[in-house]
Image: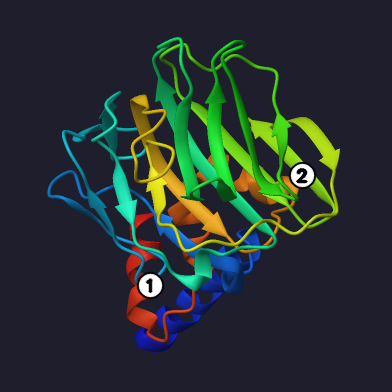
Amino acid sequence: MKNLVTILLFIIISTFIVSSYAIDPKIIVAIWLLDENKGNVIEDSSGNGHQGEIQGSVKWIKGKFSSALEFPGKGDSYVLIPHDEAFNLTTFSITAWINLKDTGAYHGLVEKVEGGTRNFYMAIYPNDKVFYGGFRANNAWNNALTKTPVLDEKWHYLAVTYDQKDIRGYVDGILEDEKSFNLKPELNNGPVTIGVTGAGGAEPTLGLIDEVGIFNDALAANDVNNIMKNGLERAVMAVKPSGKLAVTWGRIKRF
């Protein structure tokens, strides 16, 4: 009888969590929680196998959630995730937490770059110290340019979404820019980089980055805010199919 009650309680809690965090697990491409706090490899918590390798003098440090990566503002210091066709996106959402210093230059945050092509990018525009994110198509930049300055050495949550109709840029859960493009992003064979623009080390970041997520569809505003308020692990990983009750139960016990 006691075991039956435990099982029923587990089912109720699992159902509540899945209904509360309703982001479709099928749209997850990669999730880097950056909770390792040691070593030169960042694990892809989505289970899709997109591990990244730390280059140069990037360091582990206390983050927004558990640990984060500290980037020294040098072109040889970033995270490299090898090219995979899953990263060639025609619709997408990219999310990340940042805590950056003002260098007077661009900060490349999360990008897929090869030569002049940009399948997607998140960066900081130095003149106004604001976040912008988007893609290149038809030899043109297509992006959402936000309004809130973020180079203040405080934590900010950034998100950009694109559905082949509209691109939207969010800062701290607030929609700050929306534009219509109806274009297909350029595809390329370049790696994904965190902390610079491309593997050549352009536009290096100075500061902290935590909890990076890449999705192959445009998240709704409530999903963007869900991730901001609950973190990627609770907002997204709670609904990632595991095939084993023990994995889900292990996550439930940690809440």
Q: For the point 67% across and 34% down, which residue is it?
A: 170
Q: 24 or 126, which lies in front?
A: 126
Residue 192 point in image, percent of width and height: 42, 53
Q: Is residue 179 left or right of residue 152?
A: right
Which amino acid is tagged 1?
Gly
Q: Is residue 185 left or right of residue 55?
A: right
Asked if residue 227 shows in the view, the reply is no
Name the mark on residue 61.
none
Q: Quadrant of residue 211?
A: top left
Residue 51 point in image, percent of width and height: 30, 62
* Label 1: element kind: loop
Q: 233 or 119, which lies in front?
A: 119
How packed mark 1 is, by other alpha carbons closer than 10 Å (few <14, some 14-19, many 20 or more), is: some
Q: For the point 65% across and 57% down, which residue is it?
A: 186
What residue is shown with label 2?
Answer: 167
Residue 148 point in image, percent of width and height: 65, 16
Q: Quadrant of residue 47?
A: bottom left
* Label 2: element kind: strand
Q: Nearer the viewer, mark 2 or mark 1?
A: 2
* Mark 2 / mark 1, whichever is N-terminal: 1
Q: CA distance from mark 2 to mark 1?
A: 27 Å
How packed mark 2 is, by other alpha carbons closer than 10 Å (few <14, some 14-19, many 20 or more), is: many
What residue is shown with label 1?
Answer: 47
Q: For the point 40% across and 73% down, which residue is it?
A: 48
Q: 248 or 178, which lies in front?
A: 178
Which amino acid is tagged 2?
Ile
Q: For the point 47% across and 43% down, which residue is it?
A: 110
Q: How is the image coloured?
A: rainbow
Q: Is residue 174 left or right of residue 46?
A: right
